[in-house]
Image: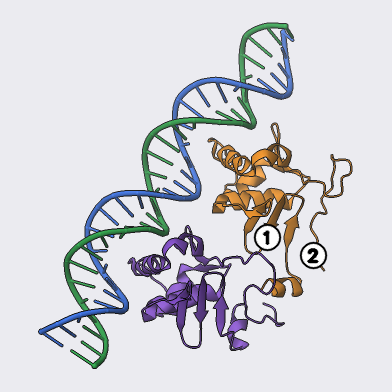
Chain colours: A orange, B purple, C green, D blue
Amino acid sequence: MERIREISGQSLMYRDTHLTVDFQKQVATLDSSPMTLTKKEYELLALLVGYAGDIVPREEQLMRVWGYSTEIRTRTLDVHIRHLRKKLGAYASHYIETIFGIGHRFQPYDTSRRAQVGVDVQTFALTA
Amino acid sequence: MERIREISGQSLMYRDTHLTVDFQKQVATLDSSPMTLTKKEYELLALLVGYAGDIVPREEQLMRVWGYSTEIRTRTLDVHIRHLRKKLGAYASHYIETIFGIGHRFQPYDTSRRAQVGVDVQTFALTA
DNA sequence: GCGATGGTGTAAAGAGGTTGTAAAATCGCG
DNA sequence: CGCGATTTTACAACCTCTTTACACCATCGC
């Protein structure tokens, strides 16, 4: 059935050297072994990965994952970020960057070993 | 999208390192010796195996094995899962995985080599 | 620089809901 | 009836998510 997905061309998928995120099955793998993510963790990761290379403001994270529109009085978001970082292990510091006062940025691993900053976002393809 | 399997008709057989399921005869073997499964147990196992690698939501398990459309107020499903796990012995924890808040997933024993593992179910076109 | 202010990191605990388990109750059929 | 299969019950165990409390760090104004 993997074949079907790919053939049907709808396989939305992020992939870099260490991490993959399957937006259909809603699962992710780190160095080929499946990550066990809770729903919220997955949603948060997927959101950041979806904006790979770009900053996602806290506001938007809260809005898209929690449905809040405003108000952040607790550390909920940060706790989830922390859990994600834990599960990303040694790569955490590379993948999830905190932009003080703004939000977070998922930074892809450059698979083609170029300059690292600004690795650009087109890491997705439609796997034509 | 699994509908395809049924449409395509007879996939007939699942097989991995330890487990086989014969969808025709409706029997299963574990390490070459026959499992004694009740009807419900077989149906549940067959359903999960049919979706090998994918999550089967509780809703669907209930619908397909019990015919409910909704409503889950008792632990019936879990009791049957438990019975299956018992009969799967030491492999239970590998084979049947619980996805919290969603359902279960049958995880095939990866025969390591990529070759036609899943015996699988011919997957052709039609896409989802 | 230095302190004030506010944002972020972290651990721990609690609430609420889901799943696991054993045992008892019920069902179904020869 | 008798017995295995199935379902229900009651509760334990577990999981996720949120909150809390506080330490730590970044930025700004002086």
Q: Is residue D4 left or right of residue C7?
A: left
Height in image: B49 above or below B82? Answer: below
Height in image: B100 above or below B115? Answer: above
Residue C20 in percent (x, y) is at: 37, 58
- Residue at image location 65% in from the left, 64% down from the top: B112
Instruction: Identify the residue position indicated by label 1 in the image.
Output: A22
Residue B21 in percent (x, y) is at: 50, 79
- Residue at image location 68% in from the left, 75% down from the top: B116
Name the secondary structure under disc 1. strand
Can marks 1 and 2 be said to lie on one chain?
yes
**Mark 1 — on which chain does it sit?**
A
Q: Please give the label number shown on residue A88.
A: none
Q: Please give the label number shown on residue A126.
A: 2
Label 2, residues with CA under 10 Å away: few <14, some 14-19, many ≥20: few
Q: Quadrant of the C terminus of chain B?
A: bottom right
Residue B2 in percent (x, y) is at: 60, 78
Residue type highlighted by circle 2: Leu
Name the secondary structure under disc 2. loop
Residue type highlighted by circle 1: Asp
- Sooner in the amino-acid sequence: mark 1 or mark 2: 1
Residue B119 occupies quadrant: bottom right
**Mark 2 — on which chain does it sit?**
A
Residue extending furthest toward the front: B32
User: From this viewpoint, is residue B69 visible?
Assistant: no
- Residue at image location 36% in from the left, 79% down from the top: B38
Q: Is residue B102 left or right of residue B67?
A: right
- Residue at image location 44% in from the left, 79% down from the top: B43
Q: Quadrant of the N terminus of chain B?
A: bottom right
Looking at the rendered structure, the number of numbered marks drawn on it comes to: 2
